[in-house]
Image (cartoon, rainbow, N blue to C red):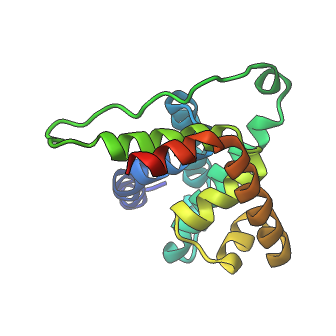
Amino acid sequence: MDQSEEREFAEYFAARRDAVRRTAYLLCGDWHRADDLAQTAFVALHRRWRKVRDKGALDAYVRRSVVRAAIDESRRPWRRERHVDAVPERPARDGAGGDMSDTVATRSALLDGLAGVPPRQRAVLVLRFLEGLDVAATAAVLKCSEGNVKSQTARGLATLRTVLGDALDDLRSAQ
């Protein structure tokens, strides 16, 4: 790559790295694995940077790479053997004042619940509800039919409700 292409990639990376890392975290529930997934996606993009014709589609390409990497990693035998009891909290940022206990409790319950949802369903839930993609865009990212997205969404929500169980009731009564 020449210097202008490297500069373009560096600017894109700097602008999108935090968002991609957050998406990866929501998919896997671990900040270290999220870093690895984001790195995998950006390395894949860097390899193909010269061939990218539509720079407007970069976010979709990186998102698809992260989701695919998360699903592929979840299929590896050593990932299935390890059971995670709790999802670690995201590091606190400076300057976040005020009483955020309700927000933290809700966020913690959601992340704990997502950790208990199978990877493909989790990917659909993250893309649909946390990334804000519609059914068609989610289907494009996952390279599946819209019907598959709808059924995975329904199953994922049902699984999330089951996993959260009493935590939802506790949150509702606390508000």
Residue 119 in the image: above or below residue 9: above
Q: Is residue 13 left or right of residue 81?
A: left
Let me know if residue 38 appears in the view: no
Report the residue at 54% width, 51% height from top.
46
Total marks in image:
0
The one nearer the camera, 142 or 55, is: 142
Q: Is residue 131 left or right of residue 127?
A: left
The one nearer the camera, 7 or 112, is: 112
Task: Provide residue 149's location: percent of width, then percent of height.
Answer: 78, 69
Q: Is residue 35 left or right of residue 123?
A: left
Report the residue at 52% width, 51% height from top.
23
Report the residue at 69% width, 66% height from top.
141
Report the residue at 81% width, 26% height from top.
80
The one nearer the camera, 96 or 62, is: 96
Task: Provide residue 114's location: percent of width, then percent of height.
Answer: 63, 44
Residue 11 in the image: above or below residue 40: below
Q: Is residue 38 left or right of residue 156?
A: left
Task: Provide residue 129's location: percent of width, then percent of height.
Answer: 56, 65
Let me know if residue 138 appears in the view: yes
Task: Provide residue 47's location: percent of width, then percent of height.
Answer: 60, 51
The one nearer the camera, 165 or 68, is: 165
